[in-house]
Image (cartoon, coloured by chain):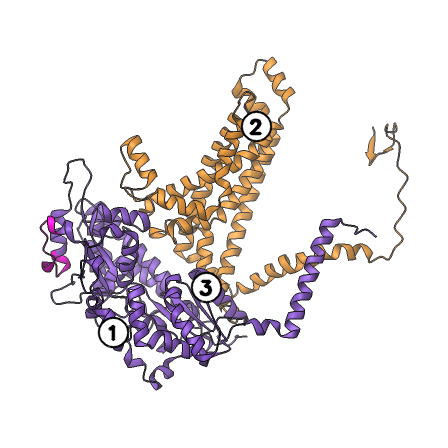
Chain colours: A orange, B purple
Amino acid sequence: MTTTTGNIAVGGVASGTPSAPPMKPYRGPRWTPYLFLSPYFLLTAVFFIYPLAYSAQLSLYYTNGPTHRSFVGLDNFRFVLTDRDFYTALFNTVIFAASSIFIQLPLSLGMAMMLNARHDRFKGLFRLAIFAPNLVGQVFVGILFMMLFTPRYGLFNQFLQTLVGWGLEERWLADPTLVMPAIVICSLWMYVGFNMIYFLAALQSVDASLVEAAKIDGAGPASIFWNVTRPAIMPVATFVVVTSTIGSFNLYELPNTLLQGAGPKNSGLFAVTYLYGFFNAQDLGTAAAVSWVQAAIILSVSMVQIFLSGTARREA
Amino acid sequence: MQFPYGSAALALLVVAVGSWVAIVVQDLTGATDARRPDLIFATFSKEHAAAYQPAIDAFEKEHGVRVSLQVVDQRALQGRLQSAMQVGAEVPDMCELLDGTMGVFTSGPLESVGFVDLTDRLHDEGLYPKLVESRFGKWSSRGRIFALPHDVHPVMLAYRRDVVKNLGIDVDTLTTWDEFVRVGRQITKDYNGDGVIDHYMMDLPSDGGDALRLLLLQRGARLFDEQGRVAFDDEKAAEVVCWYVRQTVGKDRISFPAGWGQNLAKTMQDATCLFYLCPDWRTMQFAMDVPGLSGQLALMPLPAWEPGGRRTSTWGGTGLAFPKQSKNFDLAWKLAMKLYFDNADLGARFKDTNILPPVKDAWSQPEFDEPDPFFGGQQRGRAYIALADEVPDEPAHTYMTSGIVKLSEAFQNVSIRYQQRGDEGLEAYALAELKRCADQMRTRVARNVFLQPQVQPQTPPQVQPKVGADR
C-alpha cells in the first residue's frame, strides 16, 4: 500500500514527480507563529467571543438600554418561554421554514433541472430572469408586493380574479389567514432563483459518464434522478436546506416592510421581529434571552437536518 | 522596493492612513468645531423643513448664527437618537419626534430621560396655558413634559360632495355614527349590476390600525391612562371594536380599505368610498394626490357616538424635544419660540402645511379664515379650529407599540368570531378578548422595574427583582 504526504512517496513506489527539497525546520522565536495568528484571535475574541459572553450575561438582567440594568436571574427566559407571542412567532417561523424547504427548494430544483437541459437557446436569459428578483432586496420586494396585494386595484388581485374568478377584494395583508401565504408568495418570487443557482451548479457537476452508464443499463429519467443525480447533489441540497432554515429564522425585513409591523393578530410575527420588539423597547436582557433560545432551536434543527441528510447520503 | 501585498493593498493602506491623519489633524486644530453650525435641528418631515426654512433664515440673520436644518427619516432619527443618547455621542440640539416615539425615550427612570424636562419652564414662562392642553399628553411621562407640541390634528370627515349630493345624502343629518351606518347600509351597493359594489360609505382599514385607535379616542377609550395603566379593556372599547367589526366585515359592511398613495387616489377618484377620515394634515395630501377633485370634496365633523357627543378625534402628532446633551440649549429654545410661538409665522405656515398649530392666540391670524377652493370654498382653518378644544388626550407610553399590537390581536379575534357566529354574544366576547390582551400587556409593563413605582401597578410583577444594580 502506498500513502503520500505532499508529493513524497512513503513506503512504496515513488511518485512520478520529482521530490521537492525537504523544508528546513523553523528556527525563529517560538512566539512568531502566534504573532501571525493573533489578528484572527483578536478579531474573533472582540467580535464573536466577547459579544456572546456579554449577551449571555445580559440575558440575566432586565435593562433599560445599556446604562441601567437590574439582575433578574432566569426571569427573562421564564418570561419568554411562557409568553404566548413567543410561540406565535415560533409557529409562524416554523411554518415559513417548512414552506421554504417543501415548496421553495423543490421549485428551485425543478427549475435548475429545466435550465440544465442541454439544448436550450435561451438558457442564459432564463437564468438571469429567475435569479434577478434576488438582486433587489427584501425591502424593495416588500414595498412592491404591498402594492400588488391591494384589494380591488392590486395587480395580483386582478390577476387572480381574471384567472379563477376570485380574489379581487381579498385583503392579503389584513386577513390573518392570508398573511402567511402572502409572505410565502413574496419569498418564492425572491428566493427560488437564488437557490436554483446552487442546484444548477450541483447538477452541472454530476458525472456525465455515470448518467450515460445508467442510460445504457436501461434506467429511465426518474431512476437516473433517484440513483445518480440525487446522491451527487445531496451535499449541496443539505447546505441549501440548512441555510434556508437559518435564513427563515432570521427573516425580518420582508414581513416588516410588507406588513408595517407584525400584521393582524400577529400573523406576521417572526422570531426576529419578536426579538426586535424588546430591543426597540430598550429591554436588551429579554432580547438577549430570546436570541439564546432562538440560537438553541436553530442549532438543534440544523443538527437534525445534517444528521438526516448524512444518513440519507450513506444509504444512497 | 515593492510593497509585498500588491499595489491595490498599498493604495488602500495609503487612503486609510491619510484619512486617519486628516481626522486627527482636524480635531487637534479645531477645524471640525469651526465648521459645526451653532445649532443642529433635525426633523423627519421634509414638508416641515420647507415650511421652517424662511423663519430659520430670518433667525440666522437676527442672531448672527448658523442653523443646520436636517431632514432624517423617522426610523433612522429615532434609532440614532436612542443610540447617541445611550453612549453620549453627539446629538442634534433640537429634534422633532413623531407621535408614539416619546415613550421609547421615557422607558427608564425619569432622571435618565435623554430630553430636557420642559414642565417648569413652560409654566414659568406662561406658555402652558397658551397651548391646547390635550396636546401635552403625547409628549409627557409621569406628569413631566419633554417636548413642545407642534400641532392639534383634529379629525373630520372629508367626503365626495358631488356623489353624496347625487345619492341624496343630507350630511347635516349624519350627527351620530348610528345614523351614519343606517345611511351607509342604504347606499353601499352595486349600482350597475356587474357584481362589484360601486360605492361604499366609508374608507376604513380592515385591520383596524390608526382608524380604530382614533375612534376609540373619540369614544373616550384609551390604550393607557394618565397614570400609565393599561386601559383598553372597558365596555366603551368593546363597543367601538364591535361597531368597527360590523362595518368592515361581512355582507352588511359599509367600508372599503382604500389604503394609501395611488390606491387611495384611485378610490377617491372612482368614489369607491364616499367618506374619509381626515385630520388637518391629510387635507394637504388630498390636494396633492387628487388635484382633479378640487371643488368636489367637502369637510364635516365626525358623527358622535351619542347625540351631543364629541364630534372629533385626533390622528398623529409631532413634538419638538431638546436632548440634554445639546451644547446650546438657550439658543435652541429661542429658535423654538420663533418656530412654535410666533403668531404671524404660524399663520403663514398654516397656509403652507394645512396643519393647525396648538397656539390658540395664533388662530386669529387671517390665514385661518381663508376659504379653501379645494374644499369648495369652505373655511378649512375655521372648521378645524371649531373642533380643537374637543380633541381627546392620548397619553404617551413606553409600551404604546405593544399596546397597539395587543389591541389589534383582540380586534382580529372579534372579527373572526363575527364572521363565524355573527352578532350573538359579540360584545361580551369582545370585552373578554380585550381583557385577556390587556392582562398580557399588564404583565409586560409590570416587568419594567425602571418604570415602577411611578406607574401604578395593576398586576403585581411575578418576580420582584432587586433594583440597585444600576451602573
Q: What amino acid is labelled 2 in the image? A: Arg
Task: Confirm whether the magenta stretch covers residue B172.
Answer: yes
Q: Nearer the viewer, mark 3 or mark 1?
A: 1
* Chain of the residue that carries numbered disc 3 in the rendered image: B
Q: Which residues are magenta?
A: B165-179
N-term mark: 3 or 1: 3
- The residue that label 2 is drawn on is A230
> Which residue is at the far bottom?
B124
Q: CA distance from mark 3 to mark 2?
A: 51 Å
Q: Which circle marks residue B77 in the picture?
A: 3
Residue B436 on the magenta span: no
Where is residue B232 shown, x and y percent of the image? 28, 64
Q: Residue at coordinates 48% horizontally, 67% vertically from top-left?
A: B82
- Report how far apart the C-alphas of labels 3 and 1 lie in the structure: 33 Å
List x then y, in percent, for residue A92. Answer: 41, 47
Q: Nearer the viewer, residue B440 or A149?
A: A149
Specify the subunit that label 1 lies on. B
Residue under label 1: B365
Rendering quarter of residue B452: bottom left
Q: Quadrant of the N terminus of chain A?
A: top right
Amino acid at the residue labelled 3: Leu
**Mark 2 neighbour class, 10 Å CA radius: few under 14, some 14 to 19, many 20 or more:** some
Give the CA distance from mark 2 to mark 1: 79 Å
B256, B353: nearer the viewer: B353
Q: Is residue B63 left or right of residue A49?
A: left
Q: Residues within 10 Å of mark 3 (few under 14, many from 20)?
A: some
x and y, in percent, of residue B113 in the image: 45, 74
Query: Quadrant of the image for the C terminus of chain A?
Result: top right
Q: Quadrant of residue A172?
A: top left
Q: Amino acid at mark 1?
A: Gln
